[in-house]
Amino acid sequence: MQNNIAFGIIVSILLVSLIILFCALIIKLYIRKVKNYTKLIYEKDLEYERTLTQTILETQEQLLLNVSRELHDDAGQQLTYLNFMVEHLKYDAPEITPGLDNLSNALTNLSNSVRRMSHSLNGQILVQQNIIRAIQAETQRLAQLNAFKVNFTTDADETKTLAPNAQIVIFRIFQEITNNILKYANATEVVISIQTEPRFKFSVSDNGCGFDYQAIKASGSKGMGLTNIENRAALVGMDVSITSSPSGTTVFVSEK
């Protein structure tokens, strides 16, 4: 009798154990399914964000290309025509030539500035040259604005090639950084450095007023400039590091 009771207890314990084990297995499978589903939703959200960002950037690039062509074909040609008219007037009326020299020089300088700006907006021209030379040319254009002193250093290998899209994105990031400096930093000096080995990276430092980047990042209210920089970098697999203080800001961009 006692043996039967003991056997019954053992069988009951085994059945309860099997039921608990089965329930645990079902719960584990359910949790795994929820995790996989959540991961799938997250990946779809990321893919949607990447696609949306890519579309926005492509639209921006097309707009910049259109503006570049308008500057080159319309404004550039009109400035060339005006300069031609001034030169013709100087030929017809030599007595007023001294007074027209300054106007002619100003038109020539404006025409050169428009041409450089047109080139800096044209991603196709950027791809045809080299990202390093393109950044160097943009640096020279910034220096001519006399807004701040510009120091450019590089030990980069100009023969190193990057994908065309990566070159355009990196250049637009550089333009966004320098545009932010012009608009907000009140800097008197900017230092730009480029390296290509062992991987491509560049930094832009200024001695401006700076900002509380961590507070802005924590608040989730980053401006369009910072958002554009980070979104563009993510598209081409690059990391962005920003440090800022009242004595200045440094933005570091590098391949992962």
Image (tube, rainbow, N blue to C red):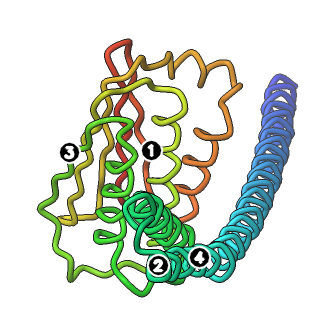
Q: Position of residue 82 (x, y in %)?
A: 59, 74
Q: Is residue 237 visible?
A: no
Which image quadrant for residue 9? top right
Q: How many marks?
A: 4
x then y, percent, for residue 203: 30, 46
* Disc 3 from disc 2: Cα separation: 37 Å
Q: Looking at numbered disc 3 in the image, what kind of residue is underneath it?
A: Asn
Q: Which residue is mark 2?
A: 87
- Label 1, secondary structure: give it: helix
Foreground: 11 or 151? 151
Q: Quadrant of the C terminus?
A: bottom left
Q: CA distance from mark 1 to mark 4?
A: 25 Å
Relative to 49, residue 198 above or below: below
- Whichever of callouts 3 and 2 sits on the residue coming sooner in the sequence is 2
Identify the amino acid type marked 2: Glu
Between 149 and 232, the one lying in front of the other is: 149
**Residue at which label 4 appears:** 76
The residue to which callout 3 is attached is: 151
Residue found at the very far front of the displayed protein: 95
| Within-10-Å neighbours for mark 4: few <14, some 14–19, many 20+ | many
User: Compared with residue 109, is residue 191 higher up or lower down, i.e. above or below?
Assistant: above
Mark nearer the N terminus (1 vs 2): 2
Numbered tag placed on residue 225 in the rendering: none
How far, Cα to Cα, is label 1 from label 2? 37 Å
